[in-house]
């Protein structure tokens, strides 16, 4: 039985005060959901203050990216070792906004994945197709390439300490959610793809769904056999709606 995981991606939103109060609001409503873990990926500059708020609580901390190099002359980048100092347990890698606006490639995403693991930070590898790719029946081919880049760089055993988030690009921030069946089909595909290389890892790895997940559609998505929770953007900015999603598990 896999544990579920719900992760909030706050993106570039909020202020220091709102980030602290959002984290406090989430913690206040956690209750005792024993079936699922929960984390928030805060903007880099708010990791220290949100880290102070979450310390000693079940709410884990994550970053929204991590550098593809360990240190050095890489202006504007934040290394995995720096994130570790602020108790980040998770790091998103390959979010579609990074891939489409900031030039992340499958190879640089794989390097970020490896850097996170070097510091025992769990990478949350985001994969997913654009609408055009889906319409051209390229969904599985795109996912293969995105997974292969990481498998080639890190090896399949690296997936023992990683999370995958399937995020169809056409569903992110658009209000268009994949249907439960559309999401399950791709999640199942991803699990089988991993299983062909290592069945035990495939059975254990958490595969999250992301893309306009909300309190009113989370239950159906989370009920699917290969969906182990969610990566939540917009709806994670409000404690009440994020908690409703978390408690739908
Ligand atoms: C995301 O940014 O990972 C995401 C899933 O966003 P949203 O929930 O807003 O679609």
Image (spheres, rainbow, N blue to C red):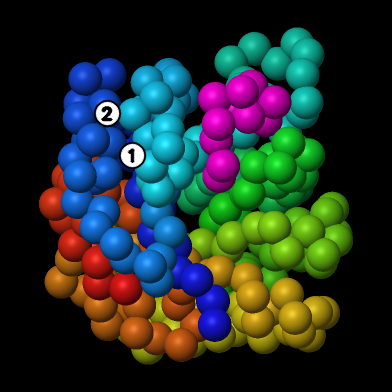
Magenta-span inclusion, residue 184: no
Quadrant in which residue 210 is drawn? bottom left
Magenta-span inclusion, residue 89: yes
Q: How many numbered markers are drawn?
A: 2
Label 1 Cα neighbours within 10 Å, binned few <14 / some 14-19 / many ≥20: many
**SS state under label 2:** helix
Q: Which mark is residue 19?
A: 2
Magenta region: 80-90
Observer-side mark, 2 or 1, equals 2
Indicate whether 121 appears above or below 38.
above
Q: Are marks 2 and 1 in contact (CB under 8 Å)?
A: yes
Q: Which residue appears at 55% of the width and 35% of the height?
A: 88
Report x, y in % for residue 158. Answer: 78, 59
Look at mark 1 in the image and give the residue it sits on.
10
Indicate whether 90 appears above or below 212.
above
Q: Which residue appears at 40% of the width and 71% of the height?
A: 35
């Amino acid at each position: 039985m896999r544990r579920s995981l719900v992760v909030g991606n706050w993106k570039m939103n909020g202020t220091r005060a709102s980030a602290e109060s959002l984290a406090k609001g989430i913690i206040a409503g956690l209750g005792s959901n024993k079936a699922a873990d929960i984390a928030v990926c805060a903007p880099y500059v708010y990791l220290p203050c949100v880290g102070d708020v979450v310390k000693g609580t079940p709410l884990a901390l994550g970053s929204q990216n991590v550098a593809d190099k360990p240190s050095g002359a890489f202006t504007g980048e934040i290394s995995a070792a720096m994130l570790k100092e602020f108790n980040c347990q998770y790091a998103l890698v390959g979010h579609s906004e990074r891939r489409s606006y900031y030039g992340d490639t499958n190879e640089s995403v794989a390097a970020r994945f490896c850097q996170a693991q070097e510091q025992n930070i769990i990478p949350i590898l985001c994969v997913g197709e654009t609408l055009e790719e889906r319409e051209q029946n390229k969904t599985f081919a795109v996912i293969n390439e995105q997974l292969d880049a990481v498998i080639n760089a890190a090896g399949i055993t690296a997936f023992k300490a990683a999370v995958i988030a399937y995020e169809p690009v056409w569903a992110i921030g658009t209000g268009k959610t994949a249907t439960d069946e559309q999401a399950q089909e791709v999640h199942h595909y991803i699990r089988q793809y991993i299983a062909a290389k290592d069945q035990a890892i495939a059975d254990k790895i958490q595969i999250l769904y992301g893309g306009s997940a909300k309190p009113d559609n989370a239950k159906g998505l989370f009920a699917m056999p290969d969906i182990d929770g969610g990566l939540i953007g917009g709806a994670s900015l409000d404690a009440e709606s994020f908690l409703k999603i978390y408690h739908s598990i």
